[in-house]
Image (cartoon, rainbow, N blue to C red):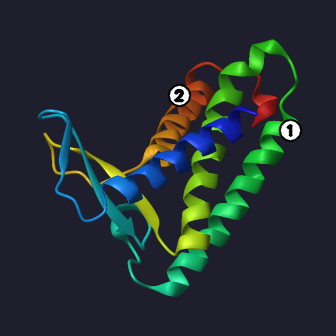
Amino acid sequence: MVVIALVAMDLWLKAWATTHLLGQPNRDLIPGVLGLTYLRNTGAAFGMFAGQDWGRWALAIVKVVLMGGLLLFYNRLPFEKRFWFIRIPIILIFAGGIGNLYDRIFLGAVRDMLMFLFVNFPVFNLADIFVTVGCFSAVFMLLFVVKDNSLL
């Protein structure tokens, strides 16, 4: 249920950006910090493989395989309250993966709209935030919190 809500938020923001930001000048959301724009990313992270149709499908296949692995790991976790700390990052990664996979397969490009104004950094979207926060938290949890090696 949480995954559906997160994917819905991501797809809604992407649809909003398409409707309200496409062809418009950049907007400040938080002046000097965060802005809004519209960008179609036909490649992977940081625009790698941009404009290459084979790259779009290769990335989609890799993403499906990785998400399948995540599901297997998630289902392998004991259904005990003490494992919430690793379930949440997996849910974030999975939801972000679905949001960007939807764009890549059905629209041919991922819709990005958020940009940092204080540093030169690629434009990103809510799904990217989910994946990034999920990955960093999962790595942190697995390295510094998990004491049960049988999970790995």
Q: Nearer the viewer, residue 17 or 148?
A: 17
Of residues 74 and 28, the one drawn nearer to the viewer in this rendering = 28
Q: What is the x, y in percent for residue 93?
A: 60, 43
Which residue lies at the image location 88% right of the left edge and 23% below the top edge?
79
* Disc assigned to residue 75: 1
**Residue 99 visible in this rendered orientation of the protein:** yes
Residue 106 rendering spot, x and y as whole percentages: 60, 71
User: How many neighbours does mark 1 have within 10 angstroms: few (below 14), some (14-19), or many (20 or more)?
Assistant: few
* Label 2 crowd bin: few (<14), some (14–19), many (20+), radius 10 Å: few
Q: Residue at x 87, y 25 (%)?
A: 78
- Amino acid type of the residue tagged 2 in the rendering: Phe
At 16% across and 43% down in the image, what residue appears?
Answer: 117
Q: Which residue is mark 2?
A: 140
Q: Quadrant of residue 152?
A: top right
Q: Secondary structure at mark 1?
A: helix
Assign the N terminus to one quadrant of the image: top right
Residue 112 visible, this orientation: no
Q: Which residue lies at the image location 16% right of the left edge and 51% below the top edge? A: 120
Q: Residue furthest front?
A: 19
Q: Which image quadrant for residue 149? A: top right
Query: 118 above or below 103?
Result: above
For the residue pair 2 and 11, the one nearer the viewer reads as: 11
Which amino acid, mark 1? Asn
